Amino acid sequence: MRRIRYGVAMSLDGYIAGPNGEADWITMDPDFDFSTIFNQFDTLLVGRRTFEPMAHSGQAQMPGMKTFVFSRTLLQRDYPDVTIIAENWEETLTTLRAKSGKDIWLFGGGSLFRSLLDAGLVDAVEVAVIPVLLGGGIPLLPPPAKQATLKLTKHKVHKTGIVSLEYAVQQIAT
């Protein structure tokens, strides 16, 4: 079965974006081999609020990945190169996980992560902690959310001060 892995950058104080969705605080680290990271996935899951800036910048898709956008307001006919999921998302993801292929990248955002985590559909949480304090913004896991128990599976401290943490999701509270 394919795994759904939430991969995200986060500030030290727990935000994945600034108060207005800003990501300009995310620093690049030469240690990160993005082509190796991207090659682990063939499917991208994004929420509407993450997708809209991607689409407006002309990057509605990542090369080599099929993109699924979770939205009750976007129309499929307006975005023919992606798949819009408005309902029955748990069934869709269960079917998608059962198909052969690479892992599935849950790219954003926080509300989508919360929904999938609460439904028991997230297998791993992979966070690059950026050494910055934002003081506010979009949290990694917006409330209300179920408690989740995680197990550290990998970590690395980079020269830039970024800390990469990878966790397996062990249990979701009922």
Image (spheres, grey):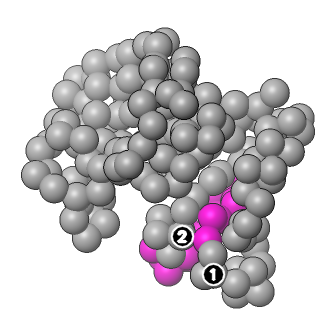
Q: Is residue 110 magenta?
A: no
Please name the residue that numbered disc 2 is placed on. Answer: 48
Which disc is residue 74 wearing? 1
Q: In the rendering, at what x and y percent does residue 45 appear?
A: 63, 53
Residue displayed at 42% across by 52% down? 110
Q: Quadrant of the C terminus?
A: top right
Of label 1 and label 2, which has the lower sequence position? 2
Give yes or no for contact between labels 1 and 2 (Cβ–Cβ under 8 Å).
Answer: yes
Which of the 4 image quarters holds residue 103? top right
Query: Magenta segment range?
Result: 53-71
Q: In the rendering, at what x and y percent does residue 167 appear?
A: 47, 21
Q: Give the alpha-carbon distance from disc 1 to disc 2, as whole Å.
A: 8 Å
Residue 35 shows up from this direction: no
Q: In the rendering, at what x and y percent does residue 47 appear?
A: 55, 62
Q: Please, what is the three-letter code of the amino acid marked with disc 2?
A: Arg
Residue displayed at 59% across by 45% down? 116
